[in-house]
Amino acid sequence: MESRFSAPGKIILFGEHAVVYGKPAIAIPVSDMRAVAWSEPGDGQLTINALDIEKQFSLKSKNNQFVTLAQTILQKTGSNEPSLTINLTSTLPQGSGMGSSAATSTAVCRALSGYLGVDLAANDVSELVFDAEKIVHGNPSGIDNTVVAYEMPVYFIKGQKPKTFEPGKLFHLVIGDTGIEASTKETVSNVRKMWKVQPSLMNGYFNEIERVTENGKKAIEAGEEDLVGELMDENHDLLNSIGVGHDTLEKLVEIAKENGALGAKLTGGGGGGNMVALAEDKTTQKKIHNAITEAGYRAYQTSFGEQA
Ligand code: PMV
């Protein structure tokens, strides 16, 4: 029987940008958008068949996240190259801060280890994917592979081992896509320029974001969704203060709030990209989702806190 292996995407719920300055951030899994991998008999070698981009990779392919991953797994388990094709597909948009590369690597990692009969713990998967992520991101923080491999919220401080934690209830989210491609590298560098000019002002904002993030973790753990919503609003205002907002993000936040969101904020790098809104129940979640799509933007519904 064919087994399918999958992994979720992720978004940052609190603390983006401040995390670059040593403050904590919280990322959560996006379980409704996933990368899926399944294997079938190969033609004498190992092939990763990336269906969405219509590309195939073998162990001879250079500089590829899946090849690095497969080589490490084969080496660690003392296995020979199997005659196997691993098919891969994903509903996660690439390059949008939703953890697409960590999710696809995790799905491939699980499909290959599953075929080899090796039982990998979430931490093993996370570490293998972290190494593969270096091919894509150069110097990844470690947050994506952790949240994706564990499929749990993660509390993260740069240079420290990411910590997973348990939400106190099921949280309903809507992600809205501005459709504006923004470079995280650019927004991070703009924040750096502002920080150089006005360090005490910017450090003050980062301290505020830290407080919001710490309280956000406690509120998620306690299942206090009203408070999580308020803190998301506060985090959004602070992100605007550090200059990473955008008119279209404001528009999406406004639509979400008008349709009953408990809170809404930009997520990830900002300057465009995605917005995330919290809804108290499935009905409001759907209402926000529909309002965003009716306004002409792409939107996704997801939840975290219980196995979907
Ligand atoms: O959009 P993402 O999920 O890649 O997050 C970017 C987060 C920043 O804090 C803006 C940058 C970083 O490297 O942490």
Image (spheres, helix red, strand yellow):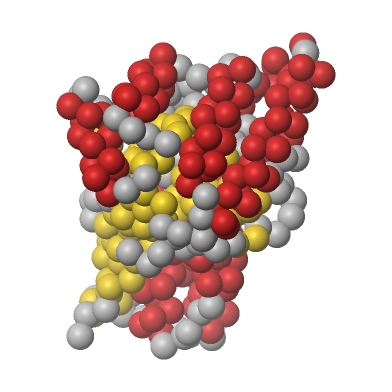
Eyeballing the image, is 153 above or below 241? below
Q: Is residue 130 above or below residue 72?
A: above
Residue at image position (39%, 81%) is 114
Q: In this rendering, does residue 34 appear at all? A: yes
* Number of on-image labels: 0
Instruction: Describe residue 283's horizontal placement relative to residue 233 as left or right.
Output: left
Q: Based on the displayed image, in which of its 4 quarters is residue 161 positioned?
A: bottom right
Q: Is residue 65 visible?
A: no
Q: Residue at x 53, y 72 (%)?
A: 122
Outermost residue toward the top in this view: 197
Give the left or right position of residue 231, taking residue 304 as reference: right
Return the residue nearer the eye: 59 or 39: 39
Whether residue 100 sits left or right of residue 122 in the image: it is left
Q: Position of residue 168 (x, y in %)?
A: 51, 60
Where's residue 110, x and y in %? Answer: 41, 73
**In the rendered image, which quarter is residue 277 located in?**
top left
**Among the 4 quarters of the image, the one containing residue 238:** top right
The quarter in which the C terminus is drawn is bottom left
**Residue reaching furthest to the left:** 294
Q: Nearer the viewer, residue 257 or 30?
A: 257
Q: Position of residue 48 (x, y in %)?
A: 33, 64
Which residue is painted at 52% across and 50% down in the image? 224
Assign the N terminus to one quadrant of the image. bottom left
Q: Nearer the viewer, residue 27 or 207?
A: 207
Q: Residue at 54%, 41% (x, y): give it.
A: 227
Q: Position of residue 72 (x, y in %)?
A: 54, 71
**Foreground: 112 or 172?**
172
